[in-house]
């Protein structure tokens, strides 16, 4: 298509929010892409100048034009010396999303796209949903916190939900690779910033809402409003699968047009039968309007029951047979960094790595682990820097209340002093410790903290390493260095085994 043909899409989807497309002949050239970073502009591309927190993208328009951009889309009026047509829009981020969808040929209309939002459980629910689609014979792409899967290719994720051109580009590649479905985690940032506008979702899922990202959203109402946007852009006939055990989910179920509710503790469309748990997984029935699925899953704990119910309810509502749902649930052996058991049968202790990095996620993790620990429960965790500080003492309180030993360490301190972050976590942990609920240890170096916890453990203790999960790096003082909780824990376990052999 030409640049002019691409820009005309804005007048269709943003009527009244787009200035007239100029009659400049320079727009009658083949369009080569839609970009928001001036460094990626090429000859024939359209540069969308996004207003940023630190700088306005319009300031970089000259660089994009110098690289060959054929037009600029911006919320600001053109500079007097602009060398290319300049289209003013009311919302540049919304324009970017719709231009990207148009440029890539609306790939979401050629497969079933399931969007999953909520504070906790998005990643695991997306993995389960993908496994069910695949078991039903539908090739399924995946976009989320851990990875982007496109056919047989796997790309490490840079963010949970990338910017609109990347989202649409990945979806186009999925369609070209023969995918009939795509499951994607949809972050609150992405919804607030219109990254998924222009996608036709086949279904939306809401897992829960707890405290997180308040450094960005500032308060829980704004945070919830961002999550709710997924259901505002959902087509009328698309199922909205909602956890009604969550208070926000209960109100959301009254708002959506085609609710499919799930719950453990109240009446809902999708509910479990009697639950059986262990370190080797869980078994139960998932009762749905379409029938009963016999669930045998390697996923551990009550939070994963919610994730299974969400995935089963979604795929059943989209027409996947019960037998395929059962096969998909059996086929998934685990999710990277989500209650990932990294110890082996030759170890005398159990070590689990998990991504839990909010007070609610940490509480769910500890409540899952507590009955599975024959002896002591030892928890290693920290809190991220340059993020919501209000959750730090809450995480400390939860850890000290539900653990026998707490080792507070660094997570990703980023530009903050890790010692100060630990002190803020201790504000919540120490009052619990004074009541005799846990021993508290602070070790700034995360590697040393993990090694200390594993060395400290006695036979049959359970050690939880929480906060980073699948991540392979640590951000300290503006530097990103390789760091893998799983690898560090396994090395410490090997040292423990070797010490035991020598002894």
Image (spheres, helix red, strand yellow):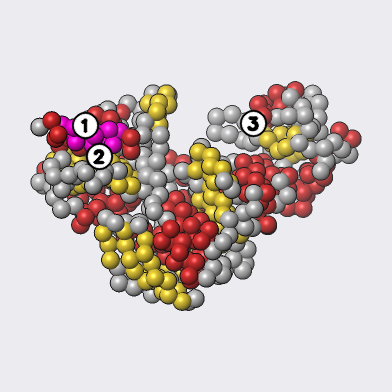
Tell which residue pokes out farthest to the front in this image: 501
Which numbered disc, 2 or 1, marks the residue that appears first in the sequence? 2
Closer to us: 262 or 129:
129
Q: Which residue is drawn at 21% across and 44% down?
A: 346
Determine which of the numbered discs, if any, sits on residue 380 in the image: 2
Q: Residue at x 32, y 62 (%)?
A: 282
The crowding category of the residue bearing disc 1, from other C-alpha atoms within 10 Å (few below 14, some 14 to 19, many at least 20), is: some
Q: Quadrant location of the N terminus?
A: top right
Q: Which of marks 2 and 3 is in front?
A: 2
Range shown magenta: 488-499
Disc 2 element: strand
Which residue has dot 1 on it? 495
Residue 145 shown left or right of residue 99 in the figure: left
Q: Does the magenta stretch include residue 170?
A: no
The crowding category of the residue bearing disc 2, from other C-alpha atoms within 10 Å (few below 14, some 14 to 19, many at least 20), is: many
Which numbered disc, 2 or 3, marks the residue that appears first in the sequence? 3
Q: In which quarter of the image is residue 58?
A: top right
* Alpha carbons under labels 2 and 1: distance apart: 18 Å
Which residue has dot 3 on it? 37
Disc 3 element: loop
Closer to us: 225 or 299:
299
Closer to us: 431 or 320:
320
Q: Where is residue 78 in the image (x, y as percent from the top left)?
A: 76, 31
Instruction: Judge whether residue 410 can be spotted in this image.
Output: yes
Q: Nearer the viewer, mark 2 or mark 1?
A: 1
Q: Is residue 303 above or below residue 17?
A: below
Q: Position of residue 463 (x, y in %)?
A: 22, 43
Q: Which residue is drawn at 41% across and 61% down?
A: 330
Disc 1 element: helix
Instruction: Judge whether residue 74 can be spotted in this image.
Output: no
Q: Quadrant location of the C terminus?
A: top left
- Give the total of numbered labels: 3
């Amino acid at each position: 298509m030409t640049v002019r043909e691409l820009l005309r899409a804005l007048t269709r989807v943003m009527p009244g929010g787009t200035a007239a497309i100029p009659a400049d002949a320079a727009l009658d050239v083949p369009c080569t892409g839609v970009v928001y970073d001036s460094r990626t502009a090429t000859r024939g591309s359209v540069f969308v100048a996004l207003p940023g927190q630190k700088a306005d993208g319009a300031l970089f328009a000259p660089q994009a034009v110098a690289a060959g951009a054929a037009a600029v889309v911006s919320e600001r009026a053109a500079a007097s010396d602009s060398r290319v047509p300049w289209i003013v829009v009311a919302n540049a981020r919304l324009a970017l999303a719709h231009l990207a969808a148009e440029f890539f040929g609306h790939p979401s209309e050629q497969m079933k796209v399931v969007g999953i939002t909520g504070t906790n459980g998005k990643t695991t629910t997306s993995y389960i949903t993908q496994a069910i689609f695949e078991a039903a014979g539908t090739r399924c792409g995946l976009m989320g916190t851990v990875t982007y899967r496109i056919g047989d290719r796997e790309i490490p994720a840079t963010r949970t939900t990338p910017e609109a051109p990347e989202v649409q580009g990945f979806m186009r590649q999925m369609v070209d690779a023969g995918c009939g479905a795509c499951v994607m985690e949809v972050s609150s940032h992405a919804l607030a910033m219109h990254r998924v506008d222009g996608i036709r979702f086949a279904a939306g899922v809401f897992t829960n809402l707890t405290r997180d990202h308040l450094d960005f959203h500032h308060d829980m109402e704004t945070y919830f409003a961002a999550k709710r946007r997924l259901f505002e852009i959902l087509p009328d006939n698309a199922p909205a699968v909602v956890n009604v055990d969550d208070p926000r989910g209960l109100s959301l179920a009254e708002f959506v047009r085609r609710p499919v509710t799930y719950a453990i503790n109240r009446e809902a469309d999708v509910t479990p039968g009697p639950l059986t748990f262990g370190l080797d997984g869980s078994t139960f029935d998932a009762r749905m309007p379409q029938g009963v699925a016999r669930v045998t899953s390697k996923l551990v704990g009550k939070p994963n029951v919610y994730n299974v119910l969400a995935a089963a309810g979604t795929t059943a509502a989209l027409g996947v047979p019960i037998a395929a749902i059962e096969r998909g649930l059996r086929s998934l052996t685990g999710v990277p960094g989500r209650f990932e058991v990294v110890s082996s049968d030759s170890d005398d202790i159990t070590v689990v790595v998990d991504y839990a990095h909010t007070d609610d996620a940490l509480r769910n993790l500890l409540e899952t682990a507590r009955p599975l620990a024959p002896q002591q429960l030892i928890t290693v965790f920290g809190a991220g820097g340059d993020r919501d500080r209000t959750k730090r003492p809450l995480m400390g309180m939860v850890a000290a209340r539900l653990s026998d030993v707490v080792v507070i360490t660094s997570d990703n301190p980023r530009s903050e002093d890790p010692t100060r972050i630990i002190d803020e976590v201790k504000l919540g942990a120490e009052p619990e410790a004074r009541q005799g609920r846990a021993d508290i240890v602070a070790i700034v170096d995360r590697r040393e903290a993990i090694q200390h916890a594993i060395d400290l453990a006695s036979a049959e203790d359970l050690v939880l390493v929480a906060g980073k999960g699948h991540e392979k790096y640590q951000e300290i003082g503006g530097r990103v260095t390789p760091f893998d909780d799983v690898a560090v824990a396994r090395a410490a376990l090997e040292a423990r085994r070797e010490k035991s052999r020598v002894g």
